[in-house]
Image (spheres, rainbow, N blue to C red):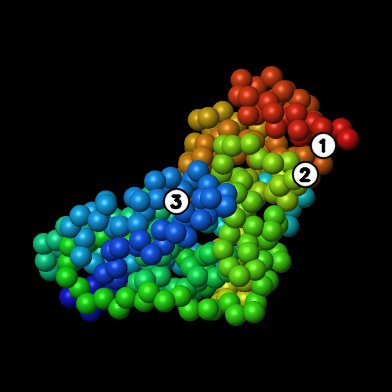
Amino acid sequence: MKQKIIEIAKSIGIDEIGFTSVMDYSYLGEFLRRRERMGYSCELEEQDISKRLDVRNIFPECRSIIAIAVPYGAGYKKTASYSKGLLSISSYGEDYHKKVRNILSGIVKEIEKLVDFKYKICVDTSPLIDREICKNAGIGNYGKNTLLINEKYGSFINIGYLLTDLELECDNKNGNDDICGSCSICVKSCPNGAIFEDGGINARKCVSYLTQTKKEIPSEYMDNMKNQIYGCDVCQLVCPKNRCNTEKHSEIDYDSLMVDLQELLQMSNDEFKNKYGNMAGSWRGKNVWKRNALIAIGNLKMISLIDLVENELSNPSEMIRVYARLCMDKLTE
């Protein structure tokens, strides 16, 4: 059955697939609690740690997990811009949640032709520790930036998995190979110094997190957000393990990742949904993007937009008013 599933995956273009029967992740409990005590975790993570530590909390019948990796961003190199906002490469094209879910649904349909089984599809929305599950399935190993790095595609992979009641032969890979060694390029390149020298990350300093949170952003972190509207790719783009990705020639036009800041400030909710609603990064909504646009306008010193920024001082949203004032301060200093 395992070999048949591998063949099914390959028939639809998925060459990175793995299997694990590890259900209990309590060995990560103290690590997660320590992150919480140290203030390194964030509100985007499941707050009840106990829910994260056993797969059977969300799928009691689970006997095996089928994990896949879907590569993205071939040939992408960050575009320098002094008048636009920037979205992470993870937001390019169709929302990866839908894309990976559809691929897993396709695998399910083919397996169902062979055997009746119960399953649950997971793509970045369950309380479980997705990267740990996929690591145990052999998809990749952690880099110092905590991203899962695949031998073939580097860290430019979207991951997802099927929780199943199938009894499959699994190659559990519980160890964590040191794939970074003495390399610390991502540590030195991280805009806000969020990555630790010995591996791990303070999520609350990470620019990707800062573009998503609705909490107050410390002023000392805003400058280093530069013109990011959603996400951040710095640690991936500098990683030597990603040369396999960034050095590939690509004819894909990534211009859709550049955001017109003036347009974003003036957009209605409907206009935002029509233009950006199919992107992964749109889930946080227009106001968070608009707040990030105000930070970017201040960082880029876009004096030409000062009248529009001033208009936002009377915005109904307190969050927008606060960041409009901070932006005005930068534009008039």
Q: Tell me the quarter of the image containing the N terminus.
A: bottom left
Q: Which mark is residue 330?
A: 1
Question: Observer-nearest residue: 42 or 263?
Answer: 42
Report which quarter residue 128 is drawn in.
bottom left
Residue 255 image point, x, y percent: 62, 54
Residue under label 3? 95
Residue 179 image point, x, y percent: 54, 78
Identify which residue is drawn at 51% across, 56% down: 34
Q: Are marks 2 and 3 in contact (CB under 8 Å)?
A: no
Report which quarter residue 313 is drawn in.
top right
Q: Residue 299 carries which label?
A: 2
Residue 73 vs 5, above or below: the answer is above
- First along the sequence among labels 2 and 1: 2
Q: Is mark 1 on a helix, strand or loop?
A: helix
Q: What element carries label 2?
A: helix
Identify which residue is drawn at 70% across, 36% down: 294
Label 2 environment density (alpha carbons within 10 Å; few <14, some 14–19, many ≥20):
some
Identify which residue is drawn at 70% across, 64% down: 189
Label 1 environment density (alpha carbons within 10 Å; few <14, some 14–19, many ≥20):
some
Q: Which amino acid does label 2 sit on?
A: Asn
